[in-house]
Image: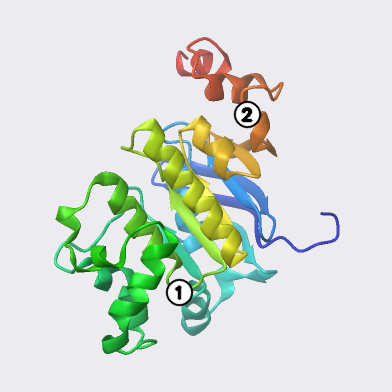
Amino acid sequence: MSGTTPKIRLRGVKKSFGPKKVLDGVDLDVQAGHGMVILGGSGSGKSVTIKSILGLIPPDSGVIEVDGRNVLSMNRRQREELNDRIGMLFQNAALFDSLPVWENVCFKLLAQKRIARSKARDKAAEILAQVGLDGSVGDLSPSELSGGMQKRVGLARAIATQPDIIFFDEPTTGLDPIMGAVIDGLIVDCVKRLGATAVSITHDMASARRIGDTAAMIHKGRIVWTGPAATLGETGNAMVDQFARGVREGPITMELRK
């Protein structure tokens, strides 16, 4: 990868909320077309890192680049153009209860007038098929869907605009192991079909190994390890392996006892 510009690059990113330091100099590279999984305990800075990249939270200092461009110096129009290239699957799907599934799937396309309303239902059916759902699901309301179906609809919405960067926030939360594996398989297939770059947050180690090419662990606001996701649990890094195996004793526990 030497000499190539990362799709996403963070250097020295810091963020505090009052006296609480959440990010303490995050350095991270995500290569184009790869899947990066960010791991870490509650309060470690995972979500703030993602929100900083998305522009939802302005960092106090540091550099965040996408395709070599510093997003922190972009004007509003440039930021909106970048956001148009980004898809997001939220932790609980975050579907709009008042809208049928087909409108949820095509919400951004309709809002930006990138598709005529008369064609949106058929477009939604086409996208739903990519996540293994029948087009008839488009006429249902989100409340009529199971948890697994809601996740699929959330994924369909995330890919509807054919983004080249997709963020996944705990994509298997609330799902049984089999459905979790199904969702992971769909994520991998959809990302590969789009040729997109994926950044995921997850506590599910099986999921991390399935959807990630590379993993990074954040602890106390710093990236403490990066490496192949397939090696999670056997990295040789005591902190990472403790987290991946879910064992009580280890360096993280010792620090929490201070």
Is residue 139 found left or right of 218 in the rendered image? left
Can I make out residue 92 in this image? no
Q: Is residue 255 above or below residue 82?
A: above
Q: Is residue 30 above or below residue 176?
A: below
Point out the residue furthest to the top here: 249
Q: Earlier in the sequence, mark 1 or mark 2?
A: 1
Q: Secondary structure at mark 2?
A: loop
Of 179 and 18, nearer the camera is 179
Q: Secondary structure at mark 1?
A: loop
Of 38 and 255, nearer the camera is 38
**Residue 53, horizontal then vertical, whole percent:** 52, 60
Q: Residue at x 57, y 66 (%)?
A: 194
**Residue 134, horizontal then vertical, whole percent:** 31, 62
Mark 1 residue type: Thr
Is residue 146 found left or right of 171 in the rendered image? left
Q: Is residue 53 above or below residue 113?
A: above
Mark 2 residue type: Leu
Can I make out residue 130 in this image? yes
**Residue 114, horizontal then vertical, whole percent:** 39, 87
**Residue 38, horizontal then vertical, whole percent:** 55, 42
Labels 1 & 2 near each other (Cβ < 8 A): no
Disc number lying in front (1 or 2): 1
CA gap between label 1 and label 2 equals 32 Å
In the rendered structure, find residue 161 and report the number of the disc placed on it.
Answer: 1
In the rendered structure, find residue 176 and report the number of the disc placed on it.
Answer: none
The residue beneath circle 2 is 232
Q: Residue at x 40, y 64 (%)?
A: 129
Q: Is residue 111 above or below residue 198?
A: below
Point out the residue furthest to the right here: 3
Quadrant assignment for the N terminus: bottom right
